[in-house]
Amino acid sequence: MHEWNGVYAARTLAAVAIAISGCGDGGTPSDGEPDAAVIDAAAIDAAPPDADPSAPTCTITAPADSASTAFDVAVDLTATASDPEDGTLSGASVVWRTDLQVAPLGSGNVLNTTLPVGANTVTCIATDSDGKNGSDSIVVSSRSPFAQINHPGNNETRYVSDGDFPFTGVARDLEDGALTGTDLVWTSNLDGELGIGESFTTTLSAGVHTITLTATDGDGDSDAVSITLTMNP
């Protein structure tokens, strides 16, 4: 029994087309009208061949797709790779690349490295002893500037009657270093602008606030981070 796949189907249809076109006077009856049974073999698009079952596979296990990190914080890139003939692939057989630079990031099943600033398409390529390869890709964003809220914590609950309480945060940039003062702006979706700088104290109205710290560098590039803070009466 033939395995029914794209390649076999295309070859079968092409054979039928050739057979029909070769019958009689070429498939055109005496009335001069084209025979409806004529099939143009050239119009049949052959399906691409199935994936090579002997090629290696590579799967990125960390970080998660769409993860983000600060520009100056190294990330662990982790992958598993195997081959039907060679078994587990590791070391120089596993290479990591990003679309934001020409040189490889490095090699190995686990690679600790920083990434170029921007949205990196990180690809792991596994190559076996026959030169065949398999790959997997994720997107990891390396942020500059990078803003971080230290206090209060996300999803905390406070009381309006407590009065003033502190907000603290930091931000840093690849070119400018630490960002301070008016480079850091704090806002609430309920109360508007709250303050500027790395730390300040304020009161908030009752309700569920989205608190956002926005850091802007000397080039006008910005990064924003938000937390949720519930204020009970």
Image (cartoon, rainbow, N blue to C red):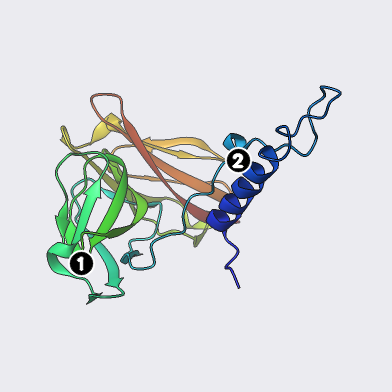
Q: Residue at x 61, y 35 (%)?
A: 43
Query: What amino acid type should be assigned to the residue bearing mark 2?
Result: Ile
User: Percent x, y for residue 99?
Assistant: 27, 41
Query: Seen in the image, is 92 located left or right of residue 126?
Result: left
Q: Which residue is drawn at 14% across and 43% down?
A: 103
Q: Which residue is drawn at 23% across and 36% down?
A: 180
Q: Which of marks 2 and 1 is nearer the N terminus?
A: 2
**Label 2 belongs to which residue?**
44
User: Percent x, y for residue 90?
Assistant: 18, 70
Q: Which residue lies furthest to the right in this view?
A: 31
Numbered disc 1: secondary structure:
strand
**Label 1 belongs to which residue?**
110
Whether residue 231 is visible: no
Whether residue 82 is visible: yes
Snapshot quadrant of residue 222: top left
| Residue closest to the eye, 38 or 32 | 32
User: Percent x, y for residue 66?
Assistant: 40, 51
User: Percent x, y for residue 192?
Assistant: 51, 35
| Residue closest to the eye, 113 or 21 | 21
Q: Residue at x 31, y 75 (%)?
A: 84
Check the image and report above or below for 34 versus 74.
above
| Residue closest to the eye, 205 or 92 | 92
Quarter occupied by the N terminus? bottom right
Query: What amino acid type should be assigned to the residue bearing mark 1?
Result: Val
